[in-house]
Image: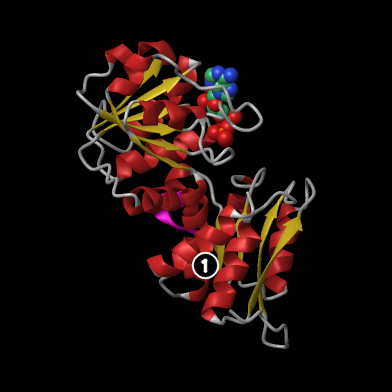
């Protein structure tokens, strides 16, 4: 892998957000550029409050090929794009901008990344009962992708049931009546299924609170078939440990981070990244978190 030599042909991509200092995205994209020999460099851009429109029109003026968008601008950016992918429109959040003739097209590769991470791990949600833990931003992606992948039933469990209900209503707008059901965390005994796939989408268990877990009742884990924790710091959360103690397969959110980046890179460069290359990038990414 030769490092990219910056010259007059170098294309620029980057991530806009605030803060951006913690981002692992440069590791993903610059590794991909090296592997494929693309003359492309990816950098972080910290954008201060109130400057998002200027940042995007400036990026277009500077011939920037593509941008990722992170907190807090994933919805603000909707006003700054010229067109939007259907999935991003449905979820109302954009994390990737792809340069088109008259501006940028918005995509949501977070949600597509979760799908690809699940499929890569052999977990197709079609006809599955899916339990989403949480009802915040991450849980929204999880609930919508479960619906789009053809889950048979979706249960959204959250500390505040009103937020779970809002998310269930939102998912049900796009699917058969009653696909998503809201419950409180301790109501998991109401789940009407012999087994279920769990997508852990709360911030509970995130470093440094590594000993915390959203549900600790063993009965919940007995019926679970597989557990995906959207958290990736620590690499093995307490949720994953409890699942594994019950003999269940788990995966953390690093593969979702990987694939959201890979899908963005594919869109910018009009290529398909192979699984072999994805594995190479994954090992680089593991070293950054
Ligand atoms: P993100 O964008 O990462 O999803 P978020 O939108 O703030 O972050 O959502 C955090 C999720 O973790 C919510 O579902 C939150 O539950 P509430 O909606 O009831 O606040 C959940 N969460 C965070 N801390 C929690 C805790 N100590 N106990 C239970 N749930 C918690």
Position of residue 5 measured from the top left corner of the image (x, y, whole percent):
70, 84
- Tell me if 32 is positioned left or right of 207 in this view: left
What residue is shown at x 42% (from left), y 45% (from top)? 90
- Tell me if 129 is positioned left or right of 163 in this view: left
Q: Which residue is mark 1?
A: 265
Dot 1 crowding, Cα within 10 Å, few <14, some 14–19, many 20+ = many
What residue is shown at x 54% (from left), y 51% (from top)? 94
Ligand 1 sits in which quadrant? top right
Position of residue 217 measured from the top left corner of the image (x, y, whole percent):
40, 14
Q: Is residue 141 above or below residue 44?
A: above
Q: Which residues are magenta?
A: 83-88
Q: Residue 18 magenta-drawn?
A: no
Position of residue 216 measured from the top left corner of the image (x, y, whole percent):
44, 16
Query: Which of the 4 image quadrants contains residue 59?
Result: bottom right
Q: Residue 86 magenta-drawn?
A: yes
Q: Is residue 50 visible?
A: yes
- Tell me if 153 is positioned left or right of 283 in this view: left
Q: Is residue 256 above or below residue 40?
A: above
């Amino acid at each position: 892998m030769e490092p990219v030599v910056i010259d007059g042909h170098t294309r620029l991509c980057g991530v806009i957000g605030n803060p951006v200092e913690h981002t692992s995205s440069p590791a993903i994209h610059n590794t991909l550029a090296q592997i494929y020999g693309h003359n492309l460099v990816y950098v972080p851009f910290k954008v201060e409050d109130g400057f998002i429109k200027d940042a995007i029109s400036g990026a277009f003026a500077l011939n920037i090929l593509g941008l990722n968008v992170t907190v807090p601008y994933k919805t603000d950016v909707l006003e700054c794009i010229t067109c939007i992918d259907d999935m991003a429109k449905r979820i109302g959040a954009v994390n990737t901008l792809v340069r088109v003739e008259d501006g940028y097209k918005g995509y949501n590769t977070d949600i597509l990344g979760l799908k690809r991470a699940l499929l890569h791990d052999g977990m197709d949600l079609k006809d599955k009962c899916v339990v989403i833990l949480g009802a915040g931003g991450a849980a929204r992606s999880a609930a919508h992708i479960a619906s789009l992948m053809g889950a048979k039933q979706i249960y959204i469990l959250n500390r505040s049931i009103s937020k779970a209900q809002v998310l269930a209503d939102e998912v049900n707008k796009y699917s058969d009546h009653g696909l998503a059901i809201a419950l409180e965390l301790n109501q998991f005994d109401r789940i009407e299924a012999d087994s279920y796939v769990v997508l852990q989408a709360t911030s509970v268990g995130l470093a440094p609170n590594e000993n915390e877990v959203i549900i600790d009742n063993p009965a919940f884990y007995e019926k679970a078939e597989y557990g995906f924790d959207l958290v990736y710091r620590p690499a093995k959360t307490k949720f994953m440990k409890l699942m594994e103690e019950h003999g269940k397969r788990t995966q953390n959110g690093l593969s979702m981070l990987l694939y959201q980046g890979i899908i963005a890179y594919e869109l910018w460069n009009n290529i398909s990244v192979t699984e072999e290359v994805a594995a190479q990038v994954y090992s680089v990414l593991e070293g950054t978190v």
